[in-house]
Image (cartoon, rainbow, N blue to C red):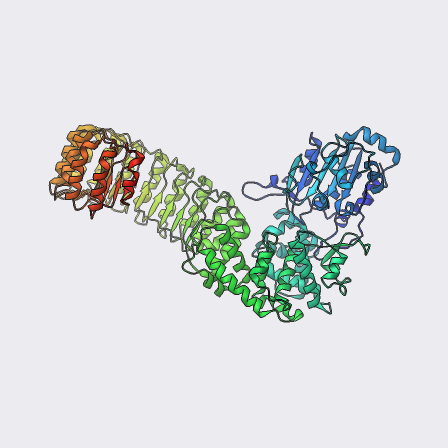
């Protein structure tokens, strides 16, 4: 096979470079300007890549060097597929790779579409590739394993390639249509064993293609940097300016991965920089600049744009990417055929067979938006126009939004004349009403779309009109793409201050996304990143947003933050307004407690609430925090350390902090830590100290026993004790220990208002003593939780007697799983009828039956103070559900 002839054929093109079409693939390869695009597999977790990341070329070569016989290259328009395929073929011809193949055939479907009639596979190869000698064909057919076919623009095939709708051809000498020959090869009927690389824009509609799929990302940062350096080779400063503006300018980012788009943008930027003009701020402004550049030398510009608009609409509605010359004439192009080359590509230059298509769908949609606002020949409204193109045009409404603003359309009106004011007014009316309706809903994708349109309009007063007080912009906007981040940030900045930035379940907050969101975050009173993953690069931007920002609450629970990232975040905690920080299950260890302690004692920290449960803080880490609690600069009042591997070993330090006179701690949760009797003894020393301000202590499931109760009793008997809430649930206190607590509760002036003793192995005598406390006239208890203690009806009856007593102040009583039966219902209802304070009664997981339901429903309906009765998981049948439905205060 003549490799030189193949290389010449591959690089040959009769087309020319255009602003919208980009530089020709052959020229890019010949001039050593080729930059390999990236595949989706090359993108790391945090969204960043470097020069060593696997490229498209490497992915294709790797697949072909293995047993894979078909590689399907998937990438959007302008993503570099054609150039990549040509580089693959040229590399083979130069002997650089794929030398295990003796023959390589390169076909472009835009050319194959013009082969009418039928021909054999042998004839196709000889006719389309004149560099193949006829005598080589028999060997090629005998040894198909040494043959590679490269098909570009497979989705441009005018006929279906689906084997289910074709009669496949088994004989290489049998004449068939081109589509049948290609389908027969791809599906193994012809030349079985040959290898294929095919390029398509979308995997949808080509699911019948088997083989390895390679999804193109195109150009990310390293490739864009290399591209801009090459484009502005004589001006490094301009290269940097162009790249940074392209990457940061509002709304551009996802299309900047297209090499063709990079060509267009750099060309426009160069023209604007050379003339000293301002670079565009939005996608709409960019395309205004492009269109102005393309039509400024045209005599009948308005007519040309209107004709292009008709073609654009036709191609979108009929879902055809191209038009014939006859169709073009019907749109009014007769006088503009010499001018359309800047806008359209021609796939066959024979005048009677010419097929015309837009170089770029983005330009196609922009032309359609412009022509719609120019047209005065019809009265079609914007809603009808958008509905007509719905699902086919991605940016049409965005371009209409941009062009509806006078400053953005002014350069075009200078060249084209004034646009249709009725249509502009109609669009604004539609946009405002539809946006207000959208923002009252809960669909985040629709919210983002609205923000994108506001971004394109660049009208701050419009943002404030559309985002009215009824807008639900506090819904979760998790998992945004970068464009969404840019649009959201623009809207928030226009509003000036936001109540809540909700990014719940953001699976991958990249550095670039965080950078765009930082201004928004700094304006938000509350930020939610719960159940999210933050890349290392994202954290400094979050820290920067907190520092000097308005944020008062930050929720990072279950965010897999880790020590390294949290150390970075601590820098932002030193000078911020943060009041509440939630770090539950963030994979933190004691190693970060020094940084946290430093932030808490910085003198500018306002942090009052800190949740750090389910992190491996340990005693050493907790002791570092205890030093901070003794500083007058630490403002912390509420600390949650559930299951943080804290033990009795650090309780002396904690106790010292509580009684230091400097600690502001009011509420501490140490649930599921191994505190034990020794730890309790140390804690209770501080509870008796006049300088201790602690009001709430949670020691749920802390391996306490009845031996701890004398210490608690002594503390509660102290006149200096300020504790109002004590949770000792899920500890084996037993009868003796609990009775000691009851003795302390009798003390006049005992401040206890909420006591939790769930699953503490309590007995009926304890319930009797608790009843006596509640009836005694000195108790301030308003909440009593004694569930999961099997005392039965007789044990609970003591508490029911207390409920009926005028001295009882209880507002909440939890009797879950205490062994109640229908036998207690009469006493229960009598107590509820007498009681004037109880609001909530918990009776879950007992043994009540249908018989008790009517009386319970009646007493709840009659009670003025009772707000909630929970009867879930009792022995009820479905027959009584309707009866309980009569009272909305009952849960079942």
* Image-quadrant location for residue 873: top left
- Identified at 73% across, 57% down, the residue is 344
* Image-quadrant location for residue 659: top left
**Taking 240 as reference, is 594 left or right?**
left
Q: Which quadrant, please, contains the C terminus?
A: top left
Q: How many marks?
A: 0
Across and down, in percent, residue 803 comes to: 16, 40
Across and down, in percent, residue 431 comes to: 52, 61
Pick the front one: 802 or 124: 124
Pick the front one: 560 or 135: 135
Pick the front one: 793 or 603: 793
**Taking 101 as reference, is 761 left or right?**
left
Residue extending farthest left: 776
Q: Which quadrant, please, contains the N terminus?
A: top right
Across and down, in percent, residue 732 comes to: 24, 28
**Taking 845 as reference, is 529 left or right?**
right
Pick the front one: 60 or 840: 840
């Amino acid at each position: 096979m003549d490799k030189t002839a193949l290389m010449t054929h591959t690089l040959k093109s009769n087309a020319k470079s255009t602003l919208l079409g980009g530089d020709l693939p052959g020229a890019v390869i010949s001039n050593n300007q080729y930059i390999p695009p990236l595949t989706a597999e090359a993108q790391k977790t945090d969204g960043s890549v470097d020069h060593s990341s696997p490229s498209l070329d490497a992915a294709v070569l790797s697949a072909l060097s293995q047993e894979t016989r078909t590689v399907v290259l998937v990438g959007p328009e302008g993503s570099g597929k054609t150039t990549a395929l040509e580089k693959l073929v040229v590399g083979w011809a130069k002997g650089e790779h794929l030398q295990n193949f003796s023959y390589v055939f390169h076909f472009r479907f835009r050319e194959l579409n013009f082969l009418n009639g039928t021909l054999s596979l042998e004839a196709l190869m000889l006719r389309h590739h004149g560099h193949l000698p006829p005598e080589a064909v028999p060997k090629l057919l005998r040894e198909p394993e040494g043959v590679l076919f490269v098909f570009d623009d497979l989705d441009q095939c005018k006929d279906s390639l689906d084997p289910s709708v074709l009669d496949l051809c088994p004989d290489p000498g049998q004449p068939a249509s081109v589509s049948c020959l290609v389908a027969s090869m791809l599906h193994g009927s012809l030349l079985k064993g040959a290898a294929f690389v095919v390029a398509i824009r979308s995997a949808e509609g080509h699911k019948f293609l088997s083989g390895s799929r390679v999804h193109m990302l195109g150009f990310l940062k390293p490739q864009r940097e290399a591209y801009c350096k090459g484009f502005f080779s004589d001006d490094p400063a301009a290269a940097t300016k162009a790249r940074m503006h392209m990457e940061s300018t509002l709304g551009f980012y996802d299309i900047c991965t297209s090499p063709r788009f990079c060509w267009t943008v750099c060309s426009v930027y160069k023209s604007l920089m050379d003339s000293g003009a301002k670079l565009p701020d939005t996608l709409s402004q960019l395309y205004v600049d492009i269109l102005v550049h393309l039509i400024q030398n045209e005599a009948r510009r308005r007519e040309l744009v209107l004709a292009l608009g008709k073609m654009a609409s036709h191609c979108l509605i009929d879902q055809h990417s191209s038009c014939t010359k006859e169709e073009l004439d019907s749109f009014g192009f007769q006088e503009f055929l010499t001018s359309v080359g800047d806008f359209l590509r021609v796939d066959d230059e024979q005048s009677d067979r010419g097929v015309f298509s837009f170089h770029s769908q983005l330009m196609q949609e922009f032309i359609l938006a412009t022509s719609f606002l120019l047209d005065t020949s019809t009265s079609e409204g914007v809603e009808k126009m958008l509905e007509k193109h719905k699902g086919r045009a991605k940016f049409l409404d965005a371009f209409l939004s941009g062009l509806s603003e006078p400053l953005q359309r002014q350069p075009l009106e200078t060249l084209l004349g004034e646009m249709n004011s009725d249509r502009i007014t109609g669009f604004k009316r539609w946009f405002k009403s539809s946006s207000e309706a959208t923002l009252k809903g809960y669909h985040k994708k629709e919210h983002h779309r609205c923000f994108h349109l506001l971004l394109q309009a660049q009208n701050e007063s419009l943002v404030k009109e559309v985002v009215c007080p009824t807008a639900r912009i506090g819904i979760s906007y998790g998992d945004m793409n970068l464009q969404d981040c840019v649009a959201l940030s623009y809207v928030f900045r226009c509003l000036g201050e936001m109540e809540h930035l909700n990014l719940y379940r953001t699976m991958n907050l990249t550095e670039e996304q965080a950078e765009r969101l930082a201004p928004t975050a700094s304006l938000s009173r509350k930020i939610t990143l719960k159940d999210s993953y933050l890349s290392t690069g994202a954290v400094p931007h979050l820290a920067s947003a907190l520092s000097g920002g308005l944020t008062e609450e930050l929720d990072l629970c279950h965010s897999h933050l880790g020590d390294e990232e949290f150390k970075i975040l601590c820098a932002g905690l030193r000078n911020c307004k943060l009041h509440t920080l939630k770090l539950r299950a963030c994979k933190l260890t004691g190693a970060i407690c020094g940084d946290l302690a430093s932030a808490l004692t910085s003198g500018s920290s306002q942090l009052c609430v800190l949740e750090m449960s389910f992190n491996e803080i340990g005693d050493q880490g907790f002791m570092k925090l205890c030093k901070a609690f003794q500083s007058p600069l630490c403002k912390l009042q509420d600390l949650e350390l559930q299951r943080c591997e804290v033990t009795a070993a650090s309780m002396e330090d904690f106790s010292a902090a509580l009684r230091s006179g400097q600690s502001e701690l009011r509420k501490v949760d140490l649930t599921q830590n191994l505190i034990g009797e020794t730890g309790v003894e140390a804690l209770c020393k501080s509870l008796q100290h006049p300088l201790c301000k602690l009001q709430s202590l949670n020691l749920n499931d802390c391996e306490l026993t009845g031996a701890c109760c004398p210490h608690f009793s002594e503390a509660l008997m102290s006149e200096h004790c300020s504790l109002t809430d004590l949770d000792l649930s899920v500890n084996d206190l037993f009868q003796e220990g609990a009775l000691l607590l009851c003795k302390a509760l009798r003390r006049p002036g005992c401040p206890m208002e909420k006591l939790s003793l769930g699953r503490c192995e309590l007995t009926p005598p304890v319930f009797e003593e608790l009843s006596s406390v509640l009836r005694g006239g000195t108790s301030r208890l308003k909440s009593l939780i004694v569930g999961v203690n099997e005392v039965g009806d007789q044990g609970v009856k003591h508490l029911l007697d207390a409920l009926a007593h005028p001295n009882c102040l209880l507002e909440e009583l939890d009797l879950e799983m205490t062994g109640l039966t229908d036998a207690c219902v009469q006493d229960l209802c009598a107590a509820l009828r007498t009681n004037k304070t109880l609001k909530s009664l918990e009776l879950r997981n007992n043994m009540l039956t249908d018989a008790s339901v009517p009386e319970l429903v009646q007493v709840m309906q009659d009670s003025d103070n009772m707000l909630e009765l929970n009867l879930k998981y009792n022995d009820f049948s479905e027959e009584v559900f309707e009866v309980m439905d009569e009272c909305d205060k009952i849960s079942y």
